[in-house]
Image: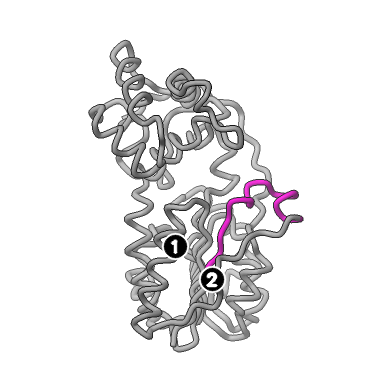
Amino acid sequence: MMSQSNKTNDFAYNEHLPVMVDEVIEYLSPKANEVFVDGTLGMGGHSIRILQKLGSKGLLVGIDRDEKSLAQATERLSDYSHQCHLVHQDFRFIDEVLLGLNIHKVDGILLDLGISSFQLDNPGRGFSLRQAGPLDMRMDQNAPISAYDLINSLSEKEIIAILKEFGEERWANRIARNIVAERSKQPIEYTDELTKIVLKAVPMKGKPQRIHPATRTFQAFRIAVNRELETLEVVIDKCISHLKSKGRLGIISFHSLEDRIVKNKFKMFERANLVRCLVKKPLRPTEEESTINPRARSARFRIIERI
């Protein structure tokens, strides 16, 4: 496991801006007395808007695997505590969560697959390539495997596979080779060390202009640590089974790997006559929202309705 260190900056929380919240409310269309699930509760930004539409007798189930985010959301939603069940769990166990609450069908489900500002802006969580911090990247900090463990223990071939499959990284071979070379001298412990290794591995002509050259590497290890794509495949199936007739599922994704899974799953269920897609192409943030919240720029929102 990762060693402890003071190589992190003091962290002050800045309020997280929920992505595409107006579109979420419009297309999921929560109404008085309904039951909704926010499978990625985060800081509660989407949930508070949903609760405002559910009225005093509506019910919201919020799920998040990050205990610290859950604590923040619990405080933020305290005015609605009588009609909220906030659960520390991975959303792939949504069926078990609902069963435990004796809830069989719901009117709507939201999954926002992005990392919250609360997580990204905290150097100690290891998600940011721009701030020095330990190589953690676990959304659930009780999970046994961190990015440190993968980076310092996997073979070069296994690292290449992660970078290609989860990061679609063109320079995967060079980056993996450099990681193995550097860790042979001493363990790679910090995010800034990994960033430097990637920058050294990627040739000048291969450095992208729009994103930081290490973005895909960080994405790949984060996805691997949290088993994000595997979990997404499983949870979509479970969400469909728990929707009432006319119930809606909306998913906000932030990169092509996620969106491809969502698109293909939705089409599969549509061909089986179980759902209908409410948008032909994913909705994107407005130019105004992208200006106010640059992290929203890559968001894609797809919505289906159970038949």
In this picture, is 143 found above or below 205?
A: below
Mark linked to residue 87:
1
Q: Give the residue drawn at x 53%, y 61%.
A: 252
In this picture, is 94 found above or below 248?
A: above
- Reading the image, the residue beneath label 2 is 84
In this picture, is 132 found above or below 126?
A: above
What secondary structure is marked by label 1? strand
- Amino acid marked by disc 1: Val
Instruction: Judge from the rendering whether residue 74 lies leftward or rightward of residue 275; answer left or right.
Output: right
**The N terminus - image quarter:** top left
Position in image of residue 306 (x %, y %) = 44, 83
**The C terminus - image quarter:** bottom left
Depth order, front residue of 37/307: 307
**Which quadrant holds residue 26?**
bottom right
Position in image of residue 284 (x %, y %) = 62, 61
Please give the range of residues in magenta.
288-302
- Amino acid marked by disc 2: Cys
The answer to whether the residue labelled 2 contacts the one labelled 1, judged by CB atoms less than 8 Å apart, is no
What secondary structure is marked by label 2? strand
Please state the total of marks drawn on the protein image.
2
Q: Give the residue drawn at x 43%, y 64%.
A: 262
- Mark 2 → mark 1, Cα distance in angstroms: 10 Å
Depth order, front residue of 25/156: 156
Q: Give the residue drawn at x 62%, y 72%.
A: 50
> Given the current orientation, which residue lies at the most extreme top position?
185
Crowding at dot 1, Cα within 10 Å, few <14 / some 14-19 / many 20+, comes out as: some
Mark linked to residue 115:
none
